[in-house]
Image: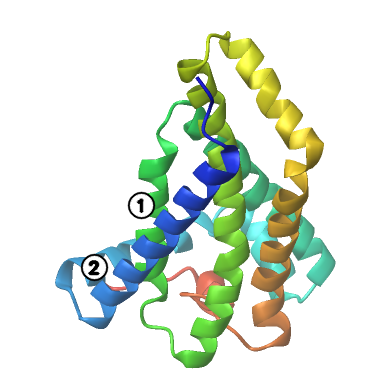
């Protein structure tokens, strides 16, 4: 039986993230109480994360406007672990559910954004969701090929690596670099803020529930 193309899987999961992001934004704009509580919870989780090393060190580089160092740290501390995690979750077929959760979470986080910040957030999301979907779809394709075709899991994993090396890595790298560049550059050069400003993150004060 012919396996589903990894690019077909990619389109599906990438669409899922955007659809659930829109749902998250809509819930916040409609002042849904549960979504507003989740918004505060997500903010406090981010604040907690950046209170400790190594994320605290990344934050210091970011505030000091050391663009290249902060971008490199962002890639290695945040993006690459996520790429590996999403690939593994794809292999165990959990990634589609995570895609729903991730899209909803981001939508709830940016739901209060005004027009200018929202444009920036969408640009960031194009690349961020890209590497989420690319890594998760590759993991999904490995397991789907194993389940649908008469081959061993090792052979299916080897085919997945071949896909990665044959050119699949190019959009993955583009999305990683694009996301890191826009995420770090926004507050430094364009006076943009994510759901939490760098100053608030540095203060480490929790959002009131």
Whether residue 208 appears in this view of the structure is: yes
Q: Is residue 175 left or right of residue 43?
A: right
User: Callout 1: 10 Å neighbours few (<14), some, many (20+)?
Assistant: some
Colour theme? rainbow
- Seen at 60% across and 70% down, the residue is 124
Say if residue 45 shows up in the picture. no
Q: List the residue tagged with mark 1.
A: 101
The percent coordinates of residue 80 (x first, y second) are: 67, 45
Q: Residue 35, which numbered label?
A: 2
Q: Is residue 206 above or below residue 187?
A: above
Q: Residue 120 versus residue 16: which sits nearer the camera? A: 16
* Residue 22 image-quadrant placement: bottom left
Q: Secondary structure at mark 1?
A: helix
Residue 109 lies in quadrant: bottom left
Q: Nearer the viewer, residue 80 or 150?
A: 150
Could you say which is closer to the camera, residue 174 or residue 15?
Answer: 15
Q: Residue at x 74, y 67 (%)?
A: 61
CA gap, disc 2 and disc 1: 13 Å
Q: Secondary structure at mark 2?
A: helix
- Looking at the image, the residue that sits furthest to the bottom is 115
Q: Height in image: 172 above or below 51?
A: above
Q: Residue furthest right?
A: 68
Q: Residue 177 has which mark?
A: none
| Residue occupying image coordinates x 75% and y 27% | 162
Q: Quadrant of residue 20?
A: bottom left
Give the crowd class for mark 2: few <14, some 14-19, many >=20 residues within 10 Å.
many
Question: Residue 163: where, in percent of width, then height?
Answer: 72, 33
């Amino acid at each position: 039986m012919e396996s589903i193309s990894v690019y077909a899987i990619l389109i599906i999961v990438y669409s899922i993230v955007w659809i659930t992001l829109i749902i998250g934004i809509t819930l916040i704009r409609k002042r849904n109480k549960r979504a507003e509580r989740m918004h505060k919870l997500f903010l406090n989780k981010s604040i907690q994360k950046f209170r400790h090393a190594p994320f605290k060190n990344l934050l210091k580089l970011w505030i000091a406007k050391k663009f290249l160092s902060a971008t490199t740290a962002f890639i290695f501390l945040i993006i690459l672990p996520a790429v590996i995690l999403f690939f593994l979750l794809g292999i165990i077929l959990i990634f589609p559910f995570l895609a729903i959760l991730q899209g909803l979470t981001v939508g709830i986080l940016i739901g209060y954004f005004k027009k200018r910040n929202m444009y920036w957030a969408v640009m960031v999301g194009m690349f961020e969701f890209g590497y989420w979907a690319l890594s998760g779809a590759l993991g999904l394709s490995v397991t789907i090929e194993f389940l649908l075709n008469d081959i061993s899991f090792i052979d299916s994993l080897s085919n997945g690596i071949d896909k990665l090396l044959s050119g699949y890595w190019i959009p993955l790298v583009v999305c990683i670099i694009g996301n890191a560049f826009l995420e770090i550059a926004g507050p430094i050069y364009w006076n943009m803020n994510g759901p939490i400003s760098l100053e608030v993150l540095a203060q480490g004060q929790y959002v009131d529930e």
